[in-house]
Image (cartoon, helix red, strand yellow):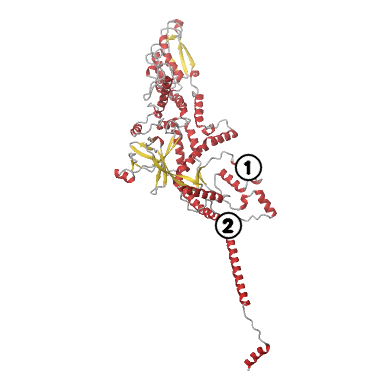
Amino acid sequence: MPPPDTGGPCAARRQSLRPLLFLCLGRGAPRDWIHRRVLDFGRTPGCRSRGGGSPRPARACRLSHPHGPRGLRGRPLVTGPADVHQAEERLQAILKAVVVGARVDEPASRPGGEESSAFSDAGALTPPYEPEALCLLVEHSNSLRQNVDAYATNIDGFGYRFEASIDFEADGAREKVADAMALERLAARDAGTLPPGTPLRPTEEEVATHAEEVRQQARVEKARLESFFDFACFDSSFVELRRRTRHDLEVTGNAYWEVLRDGKGDIARFVYVPSFTVRLLPLDKEAVEVRERVRVSAVSFDTVTTRRRMRRYIQVQGNERVYFKAFSDSRAISRLTGRTFRDVAALKASDTSDGPATELIHFAIHSPRSPYGIPRWVGTLLSVLGSREMEEVNYLYFSNKSVPPLALLVSGGRLSDASVPRIERFIEENLKGKANFHKILILEADGSGTGDGGRAKIELRPLTDAQQQDALFQEYDQRNIDKVGGAFRLPPLLRGDGRDFNRSVAEAQLRFAEDQVFQPERDEFDFLLNRKVLADMGVRFWRFRSQTTATRDPERMTEMVERLVRVGVLTPEEGRQLAGDIFHREFRKIGDDWVKRPLTLTLAGIQTGVEDLRPQKDKGALLGEAKRLLGLREELRAEEERLAQGRLALARRHMDAEHIPVPQEEFDRWFSARKS
């Protein structure tokens, strides 16, 4: 009998089993799953191995998609610039097809469906990537969500505060108020509204009066701001609105706020709008007059009128369509049809069930080729898809394992005709699932003759070397995770990977992310909110500022501030300001004079008795007291002048009296005649 591996009647049958066993050993899965995976990667059914394992020559393997061009394989070689350009276009179409394709087994790649047709019917611009498909990709990715959550937490999750345009408690506040008044008068002079004879530089009395007025207005304005942002959203906090906005911005590249106004036209509420439900309409052909507020000084605005081409937006949810207009667009636009009317009365007259469209604020990650934003991770799209495929391969191994742990070999004969279908049936049916994880494969052989040659030999052979011992493609997956993190420019520690880090490395990574990634994003958001929202609200004395995380060690920072205050480098007031940054709270202002001097000078004054550390009066109160004393001095001077004039008049009357001399004999005779 010839050896089983070199010939014999069953050699052809064994050759026909080799492709099947190769696929099972190499992928750990049966033929139907492998065939489905091949189709998922774009191969046609003709690419499956048949017989000896060679592909069907008449139908070459192609990368194809029902929504894109067929291409790249089975085509002529690319030789010229035009061919190169066409190849790049086909590659872009294939890349886009991977995102928005119509594969049934992956919901992250389904097309937009009815909503997409509704957007196209309304004339909306087509986004570079399907937003809903991008959302589903993030849900199914093992690396994207960590990066998006890190952005949302560190950029928008630490709250906010309001910074004063002019700190009225600080030194030099009156000079800033005087400068603001001078700028306002200069702007009024340029506009022709300054009264004649008014000097550009205000007097000290005008500055003092105006400073007290704006101080009271600033207090009222801050209370109004805090109340507004506490109730800026219907069902969530303003911080949660920012976190949702950041999530949409990083996932789809776009985010939207609906702005609701009250009957007076003031901003009343912000409403979160899911980004995948909104599309942009083309810019209007005619420019529109837009009134905007621009800063003239630190505490005043001026209203200017510009002409801009505005844009409308459309939202589709189910069978409902709603139109929006851009923020600060004063036109009356229908929210049901998107048409523009002369005023709201004309809009109501055309359809009583209709109403004016509300405003929409559009946040976007800038793209030079589209008005839509593009997520920063889209360049690592293939890495995201590859990691997903790797996860599926490892997961399906437990239910589609094809290599048994042990084989029972019966030799000394040949395989019977019934053995081959039994092997196929065993691999297909009896090796899948956790319940069949430890089943063995029994191979039977018939005796080939009589005598010693007819005896069968039984042998147990382990197949654990051919089994998959651990997950596949681990290094490939780790490289994909690093690529996605590099697209976000985030260190591994912020993505949840805390391996092999010490304290100094962790602090350096957090400081890098804070300085290079998080703080610039906060500054951009704060600028937009101050420039658009707070300016529209007429907020003059305060600016919105996002809170930051303390990337430094609080204990070390506290010790440093204590030493600097003790040696006199910092004043107690400056130390309290740094302490406010450490503890993320605003400390009460102390108006005493000792907080504005180095602590060493204060202690020296206490020891020598030179310095009186009693609470000093406010500068404004001192000025009023000085004015009162000056007035009293003038009154005393006037009283002294009056008394002097009275004495002078009395002296003059005494000096002007007439004196007549009378002899003594005559004087005595007058009195003696009266007695008789």
As rendered, which of 674 and 236 lies closer to the eye?
Answer: 674
Quadrant, the C terminus: bottom right
- x and y, in percent, of residue 645 in the image: 60, 71
* Amino acid type of the residue tagged 1 in the rendering: Met
Q: Quick one: 2 or 328, which is closer to the camera?
A: 328
Query: Mark 2 or mark 1: which comes first in sequence?
Result: 1
- Can residue 226 be seen? no
Which residue is label 2 attached to?
A: 623
* Residue 407 can be seen in this image: yes
Q: State the residue lying farthest toward the right.
A: 608
Q: Residue 568 carries which label?
A: none
Place of residue 450 in the rendered image (x, y in percent of width and height, measured from the top left): 43, 5
User: At which x and y percent is residue 302?
Assistant: 46, 47
223 or 44, which lies in front?
A: 223
Local SS, label 2: helix
Q: Name the residue under label 1.
A: 560
Residue 468 image offset from top left, x and y in percent: 48, 21
